[in-house]
Amino acid sequence: MTAGRRAAGGLLAAAGLALVLALTLTPAAGLDEGRFRWCLLCGDLGLADFVANVLLLVPLAAGLALLGVAGRRIVAAAFLLATAVELAQLAVPGRESTLGDVAAATLGATLVVLARHRWPVRRSLPSSVLAAAAALAVMAGTGIALRPSLPPTAWFGQWTAKQAGMEWYRGTVLDASIAGLPLRDGPLEDSRAVRERLSAGEPLTVHARAGPRPPGLAPLFAIADADQRGILLVGIDGDDLVLRVRLRAADAGLGQPELRWRGVLASLRATDALAVTVRRTGGGSCLAVNGRERCGLGYPAGRGWALVHAVPGLPPAAVAALDGGFVALAALLVGLVVTRGAAGAATALVVLLGLAVLPPALGLLPTPALQLAASAAGLVAGGLAPDGDQLAHAPVDAGVG
């Protein structure tokens, strides 16, 4: 083993362990269950949490693999660490301990071990076509998952409601309506009509008297259904206006990113008149505050990472970096199996053209230039990497298995 590989492995393993501990053992807002749950996909975000925990152990397992630790020991270490973390979370406020987290972490380490010893594909034209098709399918799936999901149930209007995990907005809603149809505080008289108008993108308007600036997200107006599922939320978070609409991702237990207009409420003071309008267009959503409107709020193809772990209130630079990293990683995986030569270049071009042209047809925003550049960089990096058979047969230390 080279000194460089050992150093890289040690740094990656240390960083991976620190990441696991930081993300799992710090207190979080929410209910403190204080018990172990024997479920694999737990709660409304069960699938998202499971995938996130699979990915969480990858850096640590990869670092141990670079250090030459035997595969079975990597898997055992992941299982023991995950079990210890889940037991420790019983005493951490806001954390929940589940069997699914242990299973997901063990699976993440197992995938790293399998990838180290048995790279599954080699560069060829069929693998190139399949990889490109898979990348475009992921983009299409992202577009489908980020479309609104409006269940045909009984709906309830909520004016400045107190919701778990959120602040209470101390302003006063005066009235709310969608395309002239009143939205009362309580059971809506015609949920079907509200659903149809919301699906058609009709404007929803809320008139209110502003309250003090809340330190966190506070609902101004919301709609929920009889099953206590959130359908829509117009909220205020400091100086920001936040819009959340139930997405198809929620039906699959995945995360739901929000839309946020930053700083628009900076000049608003308590008792000021506040008029908020929300409407949906083909290119995203439009928000208006006291006559000032901003359109084009939506999700680009790179926002697929938020389906696994949507983090509210991230700085714009961090969101842009995650968007670019998501498409770059997808492109890198394609580049690792694309055949070299004209056929491979054509396949890579199809992926880039798809990313540039298809998102609006899928209900996503046009792909920003930064994400296109990140995708191109990922394809180039994957294309320059060693072939799969070289990776599979790379020498390792004796006793690694």
Image: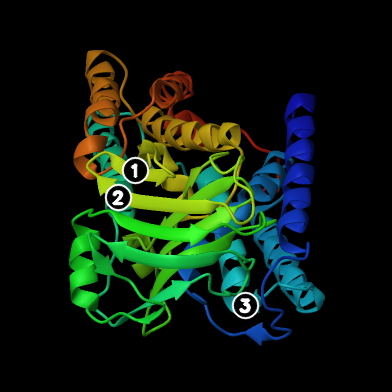
Residue tagged by mark 3? 98
Q: What is the spatial separation of the Cα atoms under label 2 and label 3, in whole angstroms?
A: 39 Å
Quadrant of the drawing holding the N terminus: top right
Q: Which amino acid does label 3 sit on?
A: Thr
Q: Which amino acid does label 2 sit on?
A: Arg
Place of residue 109 in the rendered image (x, y in percent of width and height, measured from the top left): 61, 56
On residue 286, which mark appears? Answer: 1
Q: Earlier in the sequence, mark 3 or mark 1?
A: 3
Question: Would residue 197 be found to the left or right of residue 54 on screen?
Answer: left
Place of residue 242 in the rendered image (x, y in percent of width and height, measured from the top left): 50, 52
**Residue 281 or 331: which is nearer the viewer?**
281
Q: What is the spatial separation of the Cα atoms under label 2 and label 1, in whole angstroms?
A: 5 Å
Are the residues at dot 3 and dot 1 in contact (C-beta closer than 8 Å)? Answer: no
Q: Which of marks 2 and 1 is nearer the N terminus?
A: 2
Residue tagged by mark 2? 279
Callout 2: SS: strand
Q: Residues within 10 Å of mark 2 (few under 14, many from 20)?
A: many
Callout 3: SS: strand
Are the residues at dot 2 and dot 1 in contact (C-beta closer than 8 Å)? Answer: yes
At a point 72% along the width and 79% down the height, the residue shown is 32
